[in-house]
Image (spheres, rainbow, N blue to C red):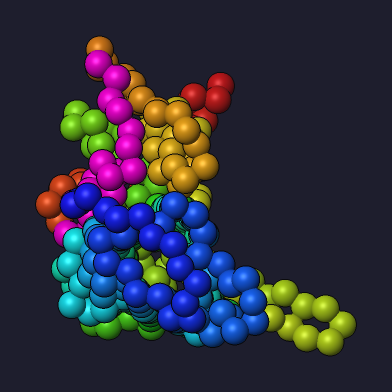
Amino acid sequence: MTELTEIRFNENNILLKNNLVKGPILPEKAAELSRTITIQADTVIEGAVYAHKLEIQQGKTEIKGAVFAQLELYVNSEAKGDISFRKSVGSANSIVSRALECNLMFHSDINAKSVTLYNAFVAGSIYADEVTLQNCVVIGGIFSTQSADLTNCIVGTFNSQSVKVAQSLYLLLPSAFSIERIVTIPGTKVYNLSLTDLGSLYAGTKPANNSGKIEMNLETDEITTALSDETAVKTIRSYTVVGKVLAADLLDFDKFQNHFLLSAVSLDSQLFKSFYMRVDGDEQAVSISFNKIKDFFFKILFGQLEIAEIDGTFNISEIVGNLS
């Protein structure tokens, strides 16, 4: 990044390029509530941001404080370079980025009425009415009150009224939920990574035996539950491999350090300590960083890192033998 120029301002509309903002950009009077902030390129904002509309036209942009846009947070579709949000991001309306060539990173949660993201990495969760993701990694969950449209994504879990899945979907946690039956485009594959040895794959060592991804069948792996009270009945569909994961624990599978890996990246914006992970048999501890974990999951998403498939079956006699 080029040397930035520190700036102070009180204008109604703010234009930033090659600027370092040492503090927050917050309204001090009523007229500034309708302020539009446009970031053209090469900008660092060290504090929180409030805007009626926040537009980012190009990358090498970093906002270290929390962000709230009343109308919209918009990333230009032609944007390139790194765009990083270090704290939570919210909008009363929409958060939109369809940029195909920018490195978009959210270190914490996203909360808006509508969220549309392409090629983004989210270390936290997304809370919205409508969520549309394409080629994205979300370490936390997708929690949408209306719909979730997921195309070629890795997500921790989801809970939505309706869900549409295309190309491929990887789940990091054993279960996901929807009210309506999931809609898939023909040829779509859904995998669960609960029994994948992510720690060894991240460290570049051989994964544990009997580890790998489980291909899910959205019909046979669906569990329907009816919840009722005095006035209404609500049906919830759970898509789960939890029985297979519990069986794996009973069989004393090697600990994959998956939870440690996921927790380290999801807490990145709140911690000041660097973490290292020691994989069994490795003398050298492996450093854990936000960017390394981001790159690791995108390699899985785009097939650059192969994960062996397991069928998720188990032998009940082995469990009985281990418990006796």
At x 34%, y 74%, the residue is 15
Q: Quadrant of residue 76?
A: bottom left
- Corner quadrant of residue 14: bottom left
Q: Main secondary structure of the magenta part?
A: helix
Q: Position of residue 156 (x, y in %)?
A: 43, 56
Which of 174 and 313 lies nearest the eye of the viewer?
Answer: 174
Q: Report whether 206 appears left or right of 240.
A: left
Residue 20 rendering spot, x and y as whole percentages:
35, 55
Q: Against 242, is 251 above or below?
A: above
Q: Residue 193, percent across and down?
A: 35, 50
User: Can residue 139 be spotted in the picture?
Assistant: no
Q: Residue furthest left?
A: 304
Examine the rendering and report whether any part of residue 304 can be seen.
yes
Q: Residue at x 40, y 33 (%)?
A: 257
**Region rendered in magenta:** 284-302
Q: Is residue 241 left or right of residue 135?
A: right
